[in-house]
Image: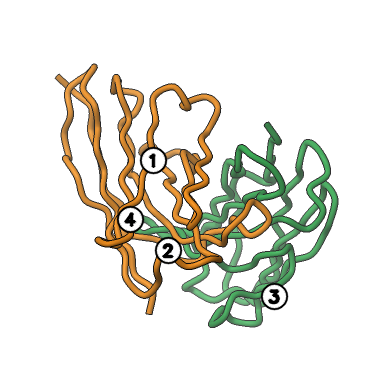
Chain colours: A green, B orange
Amino acid sequence: AIRMTQSPSSLSASTGDRVTITCRASQGISSYLAWYQQKPGKAPKLLIYAASTLQSGVPSRFSGSGSGTDFTLTISCLQSEDFATYYCQQYYSYPITFGQGTRLEIK
Amino acid sequence: QITLKESGPTLVKPTQTLTLTCTFSGFSLSTSGVGVGWIRQPPGKALEWLALIYWDDDKRYSPSLKSRLTITKDTSKNQVVLTMTNMDPVDTATYYCAHSGDDILTAYFGYWGQGTLVTVSS
């Protein structure tokens, strides 16, 4: 199975900050990577797929980049509603695997 | 508008079989380009993919749980059913169903159900 490792596991930031979350795959997955946002008690929400394609309706302050094994999710100007947990997911091969999550907290 | 909703027991005893139903609308599992997956999340932990079924009845399972899982679809009812045998307290989690594309290279989950918390306890 392809292992997905996110860093950091948690992150404190302030509204207006620019933050970057990293996801590393244990083997190359081309661009078959998705990012999700999850708030407490809610289902995950798809933000980005194909490593850099923004899902419809997702604010443009979210962006994704990378290919192969190294990927990043960047939030350019944090808003209060962005404080949540973020997960990456590879869909290059079975079994589908998720990262362990990055919790973004208010500083 | 695509919606999904999970249903099933909230409490099961160890060794019992769990049966969860995902009822969806806004798409058909008899139409090419569609899949429905199950993902779970133990309290305070990460997401774990369990199974996927595609419009053509292709089925995929997590290798670590394959012996315990069965996924089926009923296109006439717009439902996908997941059964998990021999439940254990470590299977306590919120179980989600979600809509995906029709093969591994489109198997990201654009629409999710609200999730259902299943507790395994005697």
Residue type at mark 3? Ser
For the residues labelled 1 and 4, the Cα–Cα distance comes to 25 Å
Residue B110 pos. (x, y %):
51, 66
**What residue is shown with label 2?**
B30
**Residue under disc 1 on the same chain as residue under disc 4:** no
**What residue is shown with label 1?**
B71
**What residue is shown with label 4?**
A41
The quarter of the displayed image where residue A64 is located: bottom right
Residue type at mark 2? Ser
For the residues labelled 4 and 2, the Cα–Cα distance comes to 32 Å
Residue A76's label in the rendered image is 3
The answer to whether residue B78 is left or right of residue A30 is left
Chain bearing mark 4: A
Q: Nearer the viewer, mark 3 or mark 4?
A: 4
Residue type at mark 1? Ile
For the residues labelled 1 and 2, the Cα–Cα distance comes to 15 Å
Residue at image position (48%, 46%) is B52
Q: Nearer the viewer, mark 3 or mark 1?
A: 1
